[in-house]
Amino acid sequence: MGNILGAFAVPLKTVKDKTEGDPFFDVKKRDLLRSKLKDLEKEIMGESAVTDKIALHEIISYMRRQRENQGTNIDLAYPVRPPYSFVEVNFDPREGEYRYNVREPHLRSEDAHLIQEIKEKMEATMDQEEIPTDDGNVFCRSPNMTSFIKRRYLEVLDLFDIGVDAKRNPVYQYYIERDLIGLSRCDAVLNDPFVEDISCNGAGLPLYVFHRVFGSMKTNVMFPDDLELNRFVVKLAQVSGRHVSIYQPILDATLCDGSRVNLTLGSEVTTKGSTFTVRKFSYDPISPIDLIKFGSVSSQQLAYFWTLIENKKSLLVSGGTASGKTTLMNALCMFIRPEDKIVSIEDTPEIQIEHTNWIQSVSRSGYGMAGSGSNAGGASGMSNPGGSTPGSITLFDLLIAALRQRPEYIIVGEVRGKEAFTLFQAIAVGHASMGTVHAGGIDELMHRIENEPMNIPRVLFQSLDAVAFQGQVIYKGRRVRRIKSVTEILEIEPTTNDLMTNEVFAWDPFNDQFEFNGRSYVLESIAKETGRMADRILEEMGRKKRYLDQIHSRGISYYKDVSDAIGAYYVDPDNAFEKLEGRKSN
């Protein structure tokens, strides 16, 4: 958590000391910013300095209160990389929308030219062998890289006898580090823990962000011309260890921190020029208890999923783009027994599980030109997902390998290609599996499953046990994520060939409640398989619900703590309850 909220660990006095008298900061803006930060600090921590132990959701709760209480009068500021990088959120009455503004030290033209000259001299005099690579990527910001850049900066000043005012030195270093090992104009946005997605639609256009509290917002960050944007897109590809070109102008890749990025270069496929979209990676995964706090799911639903997973049932999480499918599936993976072997299969590594008995498999795009072979799986990063290249390893290849590794659970990041047929065959013969798929409801899901490129026969699809339909909805003026329904897959009606289903949970949008219909055929099948009465299964599910409620009431939400609590329940439920009851609330 400290890595995410490190920005909030800097006392306000530090901000004052480092900006006082600094010609790069407008005095009025500095004082206003300091006042806003002090309000934020008092609200969250009283009079004490903000520490890195504050849970992220507490700050999010504060922001939500500010939005609800102040509405269009909102004027919020918080640090991202203090003391030189901050974010302001306010309401623009002319546009009728919230605005996201990055505040960095203002550079005069002579400062900008001198910084550019220093960067060029640093790059020209760098010996590649000197660059620290202990983190595996020379483009990623790390303590070794940061100290290396600072050392080389001072050496260049001395070597070329460049005079820089002592007060300007820290700001020069900030911009040089930002541009060389950070992500240039986007660095502050990418370091904001409250931003989920970042979109650039072309040169001369403002970037848009999706904020965890304020939703989609226009920013004051933009790339002024095609040349700078093209260079940045190429840099993103290089940071990801990949290549993008006019020949292959589309790229899916992963940044150093695990964030997903989609790039297009030039105007080959996008008329406004190069574009990029970054979907931020969460260092600390969302736990099941976090989902309860967010209102995305009920403890009863989680107890239901827990019961299914404990008994090796297979699930799909289905929904639209940015509906929270992977987040939900990742949280549900915490219910897998700690000793069970898990094999995950992904194009982009997103699954984070607190398990040691876990093999994380990631697909690989090939090298050279695409051939004529079919590759319905669509290896990540390929500009031609319909063709294969030498050396490519697809989800289908990884799934075949996973079936030979004798896992208790197979987890597929996204089911979308020919690997789906093999996955459902594995489910049919008893391999417990989980995965995500793009579909908003059962009819849409069946249409996708039964047609190209998956081509799953309906008789094979009925091997699946349940589907959770996740959605991003508007509730009381806020964009929220909810499990809209949980549907059990039963059997095929022999005369009509219709798929029989049971909606065991449904979200009530009027009351924001999750309603249980009172009967679960999957739980009844578990009772038959284990030789127990159905009532006993429901009782055990109720006990799990109470246990999750107790974890929630004790303020335990950090994913490692939640994972430990679930593991303790598997070992000895009674003892786990006693430990929770004796634990003070956080």
Image: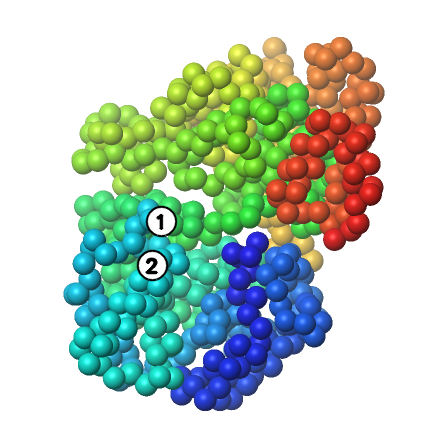
Above/below status of 165 relative to 226 = below
Report if the CB atoms under discs 1 and 2 are less than 8 Å apart.
yes
Residue pointed to by mark 1: 135
Question: Quick check: 477 above or below 494?
Answer: below
- Side (left or right) of 191 relative to 5: left
Identified by mark 2, the residue type is: Met
Residue 199 in the image: x percent, y percent? 41, 58
With respect to residue 1, does 178 lie above or below? below
- Residue under the point 52% across and 77% down: 15
Residues packed near mark 1 inside 10 Å, few (<14), some (14 to 19) or many (20 plus): some
- Rounded to the nearest angstrom, the CA distance separating label 1 from label 2 is 9 Å
Answer with the quarter of the image where residue 111 lies: bottom left
Upstream in sequence: badge 1 or badge 2? 1
Residue 452 placement (x, y as % from top left): 40, 27
Of residues 234 and 42, the one drawn nearer to the viewer in this rendering: 42
In the rendered image, the quadrant that contains the N terminus is bottom right
In percent of the image, x 70 and y 27: which residue is there? 570
- Position of residue 579 relative to residue 112, above or below, is above
- Mark 2 = which residue? 145
Mark 2 closeness class: few <14, some 14–19, many ≥20 residues within 10 Å: many
Residue 90 visible in rendering: no
